[in-house]
Image (tube, coloured by chain):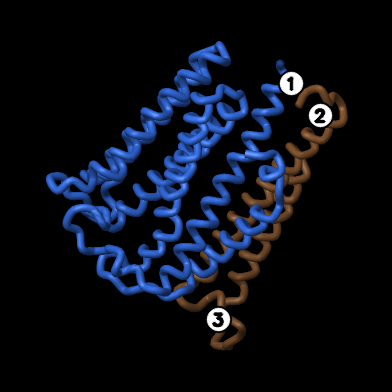
Chain colours: A brown, B blue
Amino acid sequence: MKILRNFAALFILLINTSAFGQNVTNGGVEMADRLKQDGKIYVVIGVVLIILIGLLVYLVSIDRKVSKIEKNIASGNKDNK
Amino acid sequence: MKQSILTAKWWKIACIVLLIYTVIAGFLVPVPAKPILHETIRNLYFHVCMWFVMMFVFSISLIYSIKYLMNPKLEFDIIASEMANTGTVFGVLGLVTGMLWLRYTWGETGKDWWAPDPKLNGALIALLSYFAYIVLRISIDDEQKKARIAAVYNVFAYVMMMVFVMVYPRLSSVDSLHPGNGGNPGFNQYDLDNHMRMVFYPAVMGWVLLSVWVASVNIRLEKIKRYNSI
């Protein structure tokens, strides 16, 4: 459930930033526009990074859950191992 | 495999660092300009790694299957089966990413999902033989019997995989579009310049660690399941 909440938060954040990005169209004023340069490849890197980190966070959380179960078993019935 | 290695943190952290490096450097480090391939040459850090991972994980699976046949310990069977499962997942990812890549580089752009390439067909056959491994395991109820038959079949599946992925596409009579096979000069090891090496080797390591990580979690879960039911 916690992970779902995190994903939801991330999703809302993403929607907001994308709407933001459309408002700040280049009105001839050069700002820190790195994300719009080089065919906007940096946006793709960002997207892939978000997916990768999301999956890794998910994997870490599964790993932790299994560890917790292992600990429960080890302390509860020691004759199992 | 010791439990302490499965639960250790250091190699999981290394995996995360390597993969994040792969994504950032994989997109930004300069690559050699090649006709047809263009920027898709960067798929080397992702698509090709899936196959490296698959072979690596299947090799571990084979080792543990042989270990099981020599000494029938339940743990060996669990490791062999979970490694094979993980390898199949990465193989499917390799196949699907390859299908997308070939759609825009081989043949008529944006039209085909498959190419008449021996490596593709070989990879598909290899994966099918591992699907058969999974189905075989599901179809036998008796634990001992399942483990033994699956271990024997796994040796056979590994040989099939090696023949169809590594040997068959390299035969001179069946030219493959893949680099290093047959007469395709587009992309051999001499093209892998130092910039690409700098990303490719860490990428392979990162993806391999990821696969072992996924498999290790599955192994631990499976151990809990089986030992509790005894």
- Image quarter where the N terminus of chain B lies is top right
**Which of the 4 image quadrants contains residue B222?**
top right
Considering every residue shown, the one lying at the far bottom of the view is A29
**Which of the 4 image quadrants contains residue B14?**
bottom right
A70 versus B118 height, above or below: above
Residue that carries the numbered disc 3 in the rendered image: A26
B20 versus B144 height, above or below: below
Q: Amino acid at mark 2?
A: Ile
Q: CA distance from mark 1 to mark 2?
A: 9 Å
Q: Amino acid at mark 3?
A: Asn
Chain ID, mark 1:
B
For label 3, the crowd category at 10 Å Cα-Cα, with few meaning under 14, some 14 to 19 and many 20 or more, is: few
Chain ID, mark 2:
A
- Labels 1 & 2 near each other (Cβ < 8 A): yes
In the image, residue A64 lies at what x, y percent?
75, 43
Chain ID, mark 3:
A
Camera-nearest residue between A6 and B174? B174
In the image, what residue occupies the spot 55% across and 46% down? B211
Label 1 vs label 3, nearer the camera = 1
Q: Amino acid at mark 1?
A: Asn
**Which of the 4 image quadrants contains residue B143?**
top right
Residue B228 tag number = 1
Q: Name the element at disc 1.
A: helix
Considering every residue shown, the one lying at the far left of the view is B173
Considering every residue shown, the one lying at the far front of the view is B70
B41 versus B70 height, above or below: below
In the image, residue A28 lies at what x, y percent?
54, 87
Of label 3 and label 2, which has the lower sequence position?
3
Residues flagged by tags 1 and 3 on a common chain: no
In the image, residue A13 lies at what x, y percent?
70, 60
Q: CA distance from mark 3 to mark 2?
A: 60 Å
Residue A73 tag number = 2
